[in-house]
Amino acid sequence: MNHRLAYALTAVALVAAACSDGSDATDSSTVETETSGAESPAPTTTGGTGDDVAADGLAVSADQPFPDERCEANRTAGSISYLTGFDFAATASIVDVLVARDRGYYAELCLDVDVASGFSTANYPLVAANDAQFSSSGSFSELATFSATNEADLVALTVEGHVAIDGLMVKPEVGGLEAIEGTTIGVKGKLPPSIAAMLAEVGLVEGEQFDTLLLEGFDPLAHWEVEGISAVPGWKSNEPGTLERAGVPFDLYDPADLDIPGSFGLIYTIRAFLDEHPTAAEDFMRATMRGLADAIADPAAAAAIAVELINGNGNPNFLSPEGEAFRWETDARLVVATTPEGSHPGVPDPDGLAAEVAAYDAVGVYGADGPPPVDGRYDEDLVAGVYAEDGTVIWPET
């Protein structure tokens, strides 16, 4: 069966009204700073009349100025560091922060935010040690596993994509997903859990029915040319676009087609920061969700902001404007399409997160230690609280 991902961005524009292939790589670099005195444009995604009640007497209302007491509380948090999950890529849980910073949303809420490029798996210990306060995670399973293994109290505040971002690109001559039996799959690091679960659904288990080969670097075209491999996993928002632009034929198999659960685009912090600076944590996410709404409403502008930062940082991962536009168009479509009915973009779905961990545990992803705990690894209320009933971000009068 030949599965192709439909890339057309259909319902994306509706969300404004209706509402990290994380890899071990280089160290963080190029810190971008937004101070709380920066000017910013007039709001474009405001609305609603609901109040936020994160702290008594410090409520945020869409028809009232930002409370002076809340502003002072946010300033006491000092400089807040956010580390991206993969360069300044135009992807969920990164591009929304970049847009929010570019448009001055953090400064409007009296937050001093530094944004630096990093890589998902390298960032967990930095946030756990409070050397950075927020970062981007590749999936809930990845975050929960690190937390359990290292006894870290990480808390996911957003889950922007309620589906696995991974896909498996199979060479056409192989003849289909089941035909991978007896072949070798090329991998970056290891086989993604969602791909392992998908293959298990058709009776294929790594080390038994197929082998894997560790690939070097991040170039999809170079990986595709490696002899002796039948398929390569990658992000649906990245590798397929590169291959298509190069005219390389492939068959794309999506775990979602077999009802394999997953997640992508998480922003997380540590519980200690939440407890010590509740208004700053909430308002960081308030500004970020406003950035997300803007990015979904205008994907091209959001991707351009990311590309400017990528180039300003020397573009160490050789990302292209075409690739970043494709990346965010794909991510934005998936964010809109997978947000549960009655919810809002970014709000964690407890049932979906539990299903993700259970599905991966069923195929042995977590090994002898068993699955990591789900409870306590997310906050389903914080981001939900920044939205009004009409789905817009509650923003103070400016």
Image (cartoon, grey):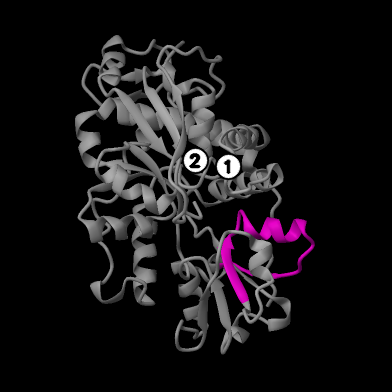
Q: Is 242 one of the magenta-colored residues?
A: yes
Q: Which residues are magenta?
A: 231-254
Residue type at numbered disc 1: Ala
Residue at 69% from the left image edge and 56% from the top image edge? 241
Q: Which residue is mark 1?
A: 90
Q: Considering the numbered disc 1 on the image, is that residue within a helix, a strand or a loop?
A: loop
Graded by Cα atoms within 10 Å as few (under 14), some (14 to 19) or many (20 or more), the crowding at tag 2 reads many
Residue 249 rendering spot, x and y as whole percentages? 76, 69
Q: Which residue is mark 2?
A: 94
Residue 204 shown left or right of residue 57 in the figure? right
Measure the alpha-carbon separation of dots 1 and 2: 7 Å
Q: Is residue 367 above or below residue 138?
A: below
Task: State the image coordinates of residue 210 (x, y, percent, origin top left).
Answer: 52, 85
Residue ID at (51%, 31%): 291
Residue found at the very far right of the displayed protein: 247
Q: Is residue 103 above or below residue 167?
A: above
Asked if residue 181 is among those painted magenta in the image, a careful observer would answer: no
User: Residue 262 occupies which quadrant of the picture?
Assistant: bottom left
Image height check: is 64 above or below 170? above
Q: Quadrant of the N terminus?
A: bottom right
Q: Secondary structure at mark 2?
A: loop
